[in-house]
Amino acid sequence: MGIRDYFSPDALCLVEWPEKGHGLLPEPDIDLTLEYVGEQRVVNIKPNTSAGHALVDHLEWNEE
């Protein structure tokens, strides 16, 4: 598997520190950030492209 396979249209690639790949990585379809809220972690999802919006629209949320 080559590096281009990671960025094919049907692949999901999560990059922990994308700023280290500036100029080499494609623009992200979504941005994910994790933050601590007390003893829990909360994920924030920001879609950046139409593909990102489509992905977020298909997520199933389990809110407790």
Image (cartoon, rainbow, N blue to C red):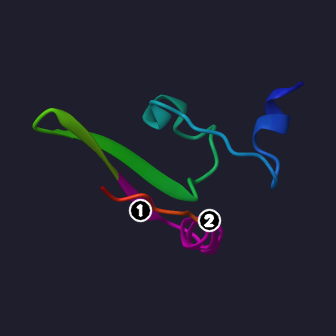
Secondary structure beneath label 1: strand
The residue tagged 2 is 55
Nearer the camera: disc 1 or disc 2? 2
Q: Position of residue 61 (x, y in %)?
A: 46, 62
Q: Position of residue 39 (x, y in %)?
A: 15, 32
Is 24 left or right of 11, judged from the image as shown? left
Q: Please identify the quarter of the rendering in which residue 53 is found.
A: bottom right
Q: Is residue 60 above or below residue 43?
A: below
- Write the residue at 52% across / 38% down: 22
Asked if residue 61 lies in the magenta stretch, the reply is: no
In the image, the segment drawn in magenta is 44-58
Q: Which mark sits nearer the N-terminus, 1 or 2? A: 1
Q: Position of residue 16 (x, y in %)?
A: 47, 31
Which class describes the residues within 10 Å of circle 1: few (<14), some (14-19), or many (20+)? some
Q: Position of residue 7 (x, y in %)?
A: 76, 43
Q: Which mark is residue 28?
A: none
Q: Amino acid at mark 2?
A: Leu
Q: Nearer the viewer, residue 64 or 61?
A: 64
Q: Is residue 17 above or below residue 9?
A: above
Task: Quarter of the image for the N terminus: give it.
Answer: top right
In whole angstroms, how far apart are the C-alphas of marks 1 and 2? 11 Å
Asked if residue 46 lies in the magenta stretch, the reply is: yes
The extreme right residue here reads 1
Q: Is residue 29 above or below residue 35?
A: below
Secondary structure beneath label 2: helix
Q: Nearer the viewer, residue 28 or 33?
A: 33
Q: Which mark is residue 46?
A: 1
The extreme top residue here reads 1
- Write the residue at 62% across / 75% down: 50
- Write the residue at 45% across / 30% down: 17
